[in-house]
Image (cartoon, helix red, strand yellow):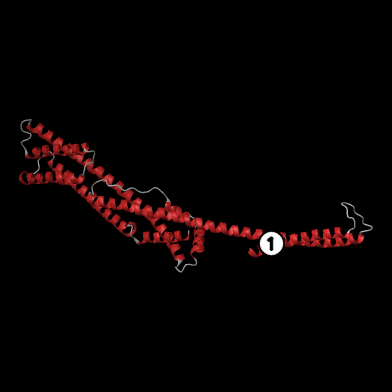
Amino acid sequence: MESLSRYKKLIKWVFWLTLALIVFLTFQAIYETDNWKLFDVDFNTRDHIISAYGSLIGGILAFLSILFVLYQVYEQREQIIIERQDAANDKQQDLKDRLLLLSNYLKTLEKDIVKHGERMEVFYKSEKDKPSAMNTMYFNTNKNFERVIEMDILSNFKAFQAFFSEDAEDWQKQFVNLYEISDFYNEAFKDLKKKYTFHIEDKVSKQKQIASDMMELLNANSRLVDDYRIKLGAADYLTKPWSILINEYTPTHYAYLQEVQDAGEVPDFRHISDNLLLPFIQAAMDIRRDEGYDDLGSRNIIELASTIRKKTWDVEVYSLQYADDIEKQFNNYFNPDNDSINELKEIKAKIDAKL
């Protein structure tokens, strides 16, 4: 490129020198002509001067035409080189833009992983603390991982090759690791969301069953007390151990539900199981030991209360198992200090260093 510019400058200088020579020869021809006048051309008496001048000018003009041709050739070559350089620069810029886009995606991916890890940590701790409660976890709805995967992998490979091929480290391995990590987290998020959805749907279904059983328990309690009232009369129906126990339990249960409602909360099945149903069942077992079950349905009520506690325990066991699994996933893959996230950070830092 520089040599072409030098040749063009040389041709320009030769061109101007040649023009100067033409001017010089023209003045010489005028000087050799006696009594020269403007447009006073006499080819008969001055043929030797005109002939010599014409021959010189013709040769010089021929030389100038060659210079023009050479200049045009160099001009075209220079234009071709410029176009090639522009194309190469555009290609290089395109590869650089790809790295920049990839760097931005990696920044978002790292942020998504860490933020979701924080939500996972809060969730599994809540599940362990209150396994019977309806604890929830939010999932991002963006598709950043899929965007990385859907990028033209060959173009991204060329971008890595263009900027990292001279590095001492194995850039090809890092490129493969980048896509392996992206694939892994893309599938991990889908799997986590699928299992979480199944867990929540199953837990909601079981909690609805428990709530329905509790309502049936309260209704059965009311029916038993009414049956005692019908059988023994208004004066004596609360003199029997079963009617006394069940009549005392029902308002206690409703009082708790009202308290929860006033606080804008939802009933805690663990509280009901431990603080309402368990004392109720223990008292019932004392009555059964001393008097046995009655014939008005006390046995069905106690069995239903025990079933509610068992179902609550089942929900909690499953929730604790699921919480343990989420905790393992968090520790292995979503903890901010895990190897995969650190490798993403390292790859992003190396890309940023090339931009």
Task: Return the residue nearer the eye: 111 or 192.
Answer: 111
Task: Return the residue nearer the eye: 349 or 271.
Answer: 349
Q: In this rendering, would 79 be left or right of 220?
A: right
- Residue occupied by mark 1: 9
Residue at the image position 27 percent from the left and 56 percent from the top: 324
Residue at the image position 25 percent from the left and 50 percent from the top: 126
Examine the image and state in which quarter residue 280 appears: top left
Q: Residue furthest right?
A: 44
Quadrant, the N terminus: bottom right
Q: In this rendering, would 270 be left or right of 35?
A: left
Q: Position of residue 115 (x, y in %)?
A: 34, 52
Task: Return the residue nearer the eye: 9 or 186.
Answer: 9
Report crowding for label 1: few under 14, some 14 to 19, many 20 or more residues within 10 A (C-alpha): few
Q: Residue furthest front?
A: 35
Position of residue 253 relative to residue 186, above or below, is: above
Q: Position of residue 301 (x, y in %)?
A: 15, 42
Q: Position of residue 58 (x, y in %)?
A: 83, 61
Count of marks overlaid on the render: 1
Task: Return the residue nearer the eye: 293 or 166.
Answer: 166
Q: Position of residue 307 (x, y in %)?
A: 19, 46
Residue at the image position 18 percent from the left and 38 percent from the top: 259
Q: Residue furthest top?
A: 234
